[in-house]
């Protein structure tokens, strides 16, 4: 049954927006599609423009400041509009007053929404919006592997903290945390269906998670992506998938460079699909050291790979794509392989939970090939 216009989604990244489209498709919120030939679509997808007057979902984009993310979000917003959804671009960063102006602009719609969909439960801005929510239904769509940590933390009743985040920051940071504590506590309550509250909490995920405390799980098998794109043309080479583990301070840059160099040599890789948050300096160093062609995708990798061309083997470090690509590329003959992160690669400032979390991402991946230990460079 199509959703009413009182369903409201908040996204802050291209992947979140993709997963909102997948959720809308799974729930039947997307308008019916006609039979316009696939080549008529400029983005190369199959299907057709939505029927006039069909009801879609209202999506609010809260863009980050980095250009790569903003560019991908604009492309994804265009795809969402093609599917018949209403998309609103709302700046909430770029100045101390920007979040408050955005909150004031969105308050009425947030209070009126009967279904609220969020892509990043760890986002402080989303948590602030949740203090206004009166919706009967709350949906969390994947923001990558962070969903695994979200489920674990809410099950333990802990405050929501990103797995790679390290405490500290001095007295000002601690004061800020203390002042923000009531907002964070309200967000945790919103994500926990309480007895008699009448609120339903759904998790829409490709991750290997188990809902708890009255949450429900709907599996994201990337049906929308498979219906709209591909199947891809396969190349003879191997593609590597980049990660932002260096940028988040988890993995040492030199160790990461060594790992990419080894994987390139042992698997005959020719292309490196960069994560949108990887720095130009790091990518330049990778290209010079390995000879890899650096590709900066203008859409999430699930769509890029499904649209093709893509290597017959795709190699990734522990990340979201080792869970999502097997769904998106089902039936194409592409092998997805994962290379473990050696504990010796971790920086001295990496979060204490980093090692266990990354190992869990790999251990729980389905339909992927585990690379032999010698695929990783030796420590030292």
Image (cartoon, rainbow, N blue to C red):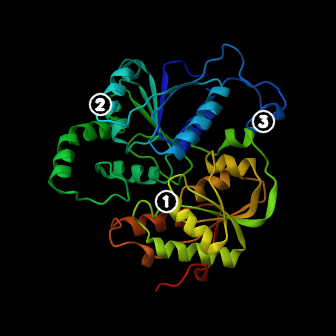
Q: Is residue 148 above or below residue 96?
A: below
- Percent across and percent down for residue 378 are 52, 85
- Percent across and percent down for residue 196 are 32, 28
Residue 115: in sight, yes or no? Answer: yes
- Secondary element under disc 2, as helix, strand or loop, is loop
Which label sits in the foreground, 1 or 2?
Answer: 2
Query: Within 10 angstroms of label 1, few (less than 14), some, or many (20 or more) residues?
Result: some
Which label sits in the foreground, 2 or 3?
Answer: 2
Residue at 83%, 35% (x, y): give it.
39
User: Residue 5 vs residue 122: left or right?
Assistant: right
Residue 195: in sight, yes or no? Answer: no
User: Residue 111 vs residue 270: left or right?
Assistant: left
The one of 158 and 310 positioned closer to us in this rendering: 310
Comes first in the chain, label 1 or label 2: 2
User: Residue 371 vs residue 180: left or right?
Assistant: right
Q: Is residue 306 above or below residue 193?
A: below
Residue pointed to by mark 1: 244
Q: CA distance from mark 1 to mark 3?
A: 31 Å
- Percent across and percent down for residue 14 are 55, 42
Residue pointed to by mark 3: 46
Query: Within 10 angstroms of label 2, few (less than 14), some, or many (20 or more) residues?
Result: few
Q: CA distance from mark 2 to mark 3?
A: 42 Å
Residue pointed to by mark 2: 97
The one of 229 and 176 positioned closer to us in this rendering: 176
Asked if marks 1 and 2 touch (Cβ < 8 Å), the reply is no
Q: Is residue 359 above or below residue 10?
A: below
Comes first in the chain, label 1 or label 3: 3
- Percent across and percent down for residue 114 are 44, 22
């Amino acid at each position: 049954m199509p959703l009413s216009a009182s369903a409201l989604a908040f996204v802050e990244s291209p992947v979140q927006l993709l997963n909102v489209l997948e959720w809308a498709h799974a729930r039947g919120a997307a308008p019916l599609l006609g039979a316009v030939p696939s080549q008529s679509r400029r983005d190369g997808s199959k299907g057709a423009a939505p029927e006039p007057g069909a009801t879609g979902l209202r999506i609010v984009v809260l863009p980050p400041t980095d250009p790569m993310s903003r560019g991908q979000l604009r492309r994804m917003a265009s795809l969402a509009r093609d599917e018949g959804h209403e998309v609103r671009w709302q700046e909430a960063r770029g100045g101390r007053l920007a979040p408050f102006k955005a909150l004031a602009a969105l308050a009425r719609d947030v209070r009126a929404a009967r279904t609220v969909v969020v892509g990043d439960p760890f986002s402080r801005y989303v948590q602030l919006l949740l203090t206004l929510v009166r919706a009967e239904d709350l949906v969390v769509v994947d923001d990558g592997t962070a969903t695994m940590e979200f489920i674990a933390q809410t099950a333990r009743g802990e405050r929501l903290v990103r797995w790679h985040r390290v405490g500290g920051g001095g007295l000002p940071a601690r004061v800020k945390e203390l002042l923000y504590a009531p907002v964070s506590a309200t967000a945790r309550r919103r994500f926990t269906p309480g007895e008699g509250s009448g609120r339903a909490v759904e998790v829409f995920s490709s991750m290997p998670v188990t809902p708890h405390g009255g949450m429900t799980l709907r599996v994201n098998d990337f049906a929308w992506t498979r219906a709209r794109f591909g199947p891809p043309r396969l190349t003879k080479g191997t593609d590597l998938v980049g990660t932002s583990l260096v940028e988040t301070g988890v993995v040492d840059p030199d160790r990461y460079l060594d790992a990419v160099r080894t994987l390139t040599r042992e698997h005959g890789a020719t292309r490196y699909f960069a994560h949108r948050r990887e720095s130009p300096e790091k990518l330049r160093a990778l290209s010079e050291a390995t000879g890899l062609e650096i590709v900066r995708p203008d859409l999430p990798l699930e769509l890029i790979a499904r649209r093709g061309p893509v290597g017959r083997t795709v190699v990734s470090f522990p990340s979201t794509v080792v869970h999502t690509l097997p769904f998106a590329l089902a039936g194409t003959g592409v092998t997805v392989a994962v290379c473990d992160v050696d504990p010796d690669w971790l920086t001295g400032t990496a979060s204490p939970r980093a090692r266990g979390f990354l190992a869990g991402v790999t251990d729980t991946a389905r339909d992927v090939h585990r690379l032999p230990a010698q695929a990783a460079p030796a420590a030292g």
